[in-house]
Image (cartoon, rainbow, N blue to C red):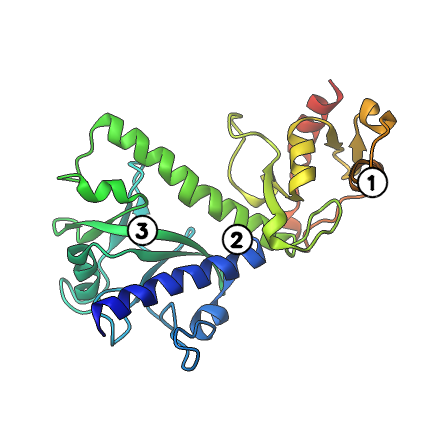
Amino acid sequence: MDSVVERVTRERAMAWVEQRAAENGGWISRDQLLRGFRPDGAEPLGLIDYSRGIRNPAHMAATLSITTSVGGPYEDRDLGDGLLHYAYRQGGRGGDNTKLRRAMELGVPLILFIKTEPNVLVPVHPVYVVADDESTQTFVIALDEEFRDIADPTSLTEDQRRYAVRTARQRLHQPVFRGRVIRAYATRCSICSLAHGRLLEAAHIYPDSHPEGRAVVSNGLSLCSIHHAAYDANLLGITPDHVVQLDDDLLAEVDGPMLRHGLQEMHGRALTLPARRQDRPDREALAFRYEAFRR
């Protein structure tokens, strides 16, 4: 494939993935990724491989995407330096790894897909291969193109490491948390049932700063933008028994239809819960946040 055509194909693939994931609330199905993208309007181009973690289209010079799993049986790992250390696939330096190494040499962007559950993936892009560590048989994947200019990404300074960890939290951990939470709530606001994925957010119950503020589904709520803002501002609370409560002053306020229908009419409403019990909000977390709301 001509280099210009390949670049355009990558750009279109990333735009397509971003649009599909946004519609779902941050996640995308395996079937969509295998058959949904048609760069020329005719034949589909799979954006992931059927059985391997590296997608190397035959007509492309370098890898298009890589896939890893949350808690999966892989050697891919985030070592706390803000960079993903992606294990060689079978074949040593050859095989599937050849085009991934070529992606590093060409400096082309890739799509990283994180499998959060069977047939469900969260995309992060663009990411870049910035190093090939033969001693550990891993590629080093950066979530920010600035790391392409670092002489040795395997030996970061303390400032570089802090920046990389902050970037990983913003571009890796938070998207995975959002995708998993919104997926668990069937892409709906748990308060008003709004079903537009682009307008949904994953709210933490225990905040990030709390020792229990883990990025797990049971510490999250799928909320539309307005209800997330009201929840974070303690204008809206949720009891441990999943009942929505509004601040007394907000209930007494007189304003337009957004306040009346969007907030005041939610007072006393029961939260819509995920189908799977393990995904439902942690009762102790809800109690903690409800006490903050009452204060």
Residue 155 placement, left or right of 288: left
Mark 1 and mark 2 lie on one chain; the one further toward the N terminus is 2
Residue 76 placement, left or right of 90: right
Residue 215: assigned label: none
Q: Residue at x 44, y 78 (%)?
A: 41
Residue 131 placement, left or right of 123: left
Q: Is residue 73 visible?
A: no
Residue 55 percent coordinates (x, y) = 31, 67
**Between residues 289 and 4, which one lies in front from this camera angle?**
4
SS class, disc 2: loop
**Between residues 54 and 201, which one lies in front from this camera angle?**
201
Amino acid type, mark 1: Pro
Residue 255 quadrant = top right
Which residue position is annotated with label 2? Answer: 26
Which residue position is annotated with label 1? Answer: 257
Nearest to viewer (mark 1 / mark 2): 1
Question: Which quadrant of the rendered structure holds the C terminus?
Answer: top right
Amino acid type, mark 2: Gly
**Between residues 271 and 7, which one lies in front from this camera angle?**
7
Mark 1 and mark 3 lie on one chain; the one further toward the N terminus is 3
SS class, disc 3: strand
Residue 35 percent coordinates (x, y) = 45, 75
In the displayed structure, would residue 83 be above or below residue 249? below
Q: Is residue 160 visible?
A: yes
Which residue position is annotated with label 3? Answer: 127
Question: Which quadrant of the rendered structure holds the N terminus?
Answer: bottom left
Report the Cα–Cα distance between label 1 and label 3: 43 Å
Residue 110 quadrant = bottom left
Q: Residue at x 43, y 39 (%)?
A: 170
Report the Cα–Cα distance between label 1 and label 2: 29 Å
SS class, disc 1: helix
- Callout 1 environment at 10 Å: few (<14), some (14 to 19), or many (20+)? few
